[in-house]
Image (spheres, helix red, strand yellow):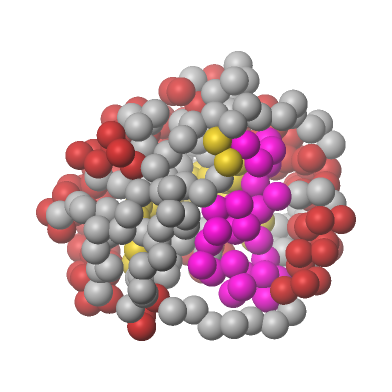
Amino acid sequence: MERLPDWLKTSTFKGLRGTKRLLRQNRLSTVCEEARCPNRGHCFSRPTATFMILGKDCTRSCGFCAVSHTRPSPVDIEEPRRVAEAAKAMGLTHVVVTSVTRDDLPDGGAGHFSATITAIRNLLPDAKIEVLTPDFKGNLNALYNVLDSEPDVFNHNVETVPSLYYKVRPQADYPLSLSVLSAAKNYAPDVKIKSGLMVGLGESFEEVIAVLRDLRECGCNFITIGQYLRPRKSNIAVVEYVPPDIFELYREKAEELGFDAVASAPLVRSSMDAELMLQ
C-alpha cells in the first residue's frame, strides 16, 4: 500500500479487546471494522463505535469502499434490540447508526433504521441518535419513515465531487443525494442535517467549494471533510495526499458559507467524534 505522510499516521491504542468482545457477543457489525477505518483504535478505546445494521454485505460496489459487495443476508429483526443493548453497555450518550445499502429491500432498509432508533430511545432516552443512511433510491416515504423516528442528526454523505461519481460512486447519483438532504431538511427542519466528502481522489479545490455551496443550499448544517485512504488494493488509488493547510482552507470556507459545525482534517471521518458537532 501507499507510503503515508506523517500527518496521516495514527497511534496505537489500548483497551480495544473489550469493545470488540462486546460487539461480537451481540453479533453486531461496525463500519469502523468493515470499512477498515484508520481511526477505529481511537474510537474503540473510548469506547464508541458506529453500528452498521442490515448485515455486512452491500448491494452496491463503490470504488472507495472496503465493505463486502455481494448478495446480502435476510434482515435480522432482533438486530435493533442488540444495537440498543450494546450502546447501553458501552455507556454511549451519542449513538451513531449506519448501514450497508440494501437496494434489494422495497424500502431500502428504512423500516429497520426506524426500529433501531426506537429501540435505542427505549433503553437510552437521553442519548442523542445520529443516522447515516443510503439514498433509498430517492424513495421519500422511506426517508420520512426514518425521520418520523426523530433522530437528532440525519446524515447522508455525498462522498465526492460530481465529476468523480463515475468511478467513486458508479451506482449513485449526485443530484439524487442532494435531493435526499434537501427533502430531509424540508420534512424535519429541527433535525440537524449532515453530509461528508473525501478528498485526494483527483478533485480540484474549486470543485470541493462548489459541493460545499450545494450542500448549504440544501440546508445542510454539518459537514465533514477527510482524506481518502485506499482500504484495499482492489479499491481505487489515492491521487493525492492533501496537506493539512488545504483542509484548513476548506474549513474556513465552509464556515464562511454558514455551516453550523465543520470537521476538516486529514483523518476526519463522517462519524468520528460525532457528538462534538452538537456541542
**In the rendered image of this protein, does residue 15 appear above or below residue 151?**
below
Query: Front-most of 222 and 29?
Result: 29
Return the x and y of residue 244 as percentages of the image width and height. 27, 76
Which quadrant does the N terminus fall into?
Answer: bottom left
Which residue appears at 79% of the width and 32% of the height?
76
The answer to whether 164 appears left or right of 171 in the picture is left
Q: Residue furthest right?
A: 25
Residue bounds of the magenta highlight: 29-58
Say how many tags the image has.
Answer: 0
Residue 40 inside the magenta-drawn segment: yes
- In the image, taking residue 150 as reference, residue 6 lies left or right, namely left
Residue depicted at 65% across the width and 46% down the height: 52
Estimate the x, y position of residue 27 in percent, counting from the top left.
81, 48
The residue lying toward the viewer, choosing from 232 and 178, is 232
Asked if residue 121 lies left or right of residue 239, the reply is: right
Residue 252 % position (x, y): 23, 69
Tell me if residue 71 is in the magenta stretch: no
Can residue 91 be spotted in the picture?
A: no
- Using the image, determine if residue 223 lies above or below residue 146: below
Instruction: Say if residue 17 shows up in the picture.
Output: yes
Nearest to the observer: residue 107 or residue 12: 12
Observer-nearest of 28 and 91: 28
Tell me which residue sits at (49%, 79%) in the image.
10
Which residue lies at the image location 46% right of the left edge and 35% below the top edge? Answer: 61
The outermost residue toward the left is 206
How far across and how far down the image is residue 271, in percent? 53, 58
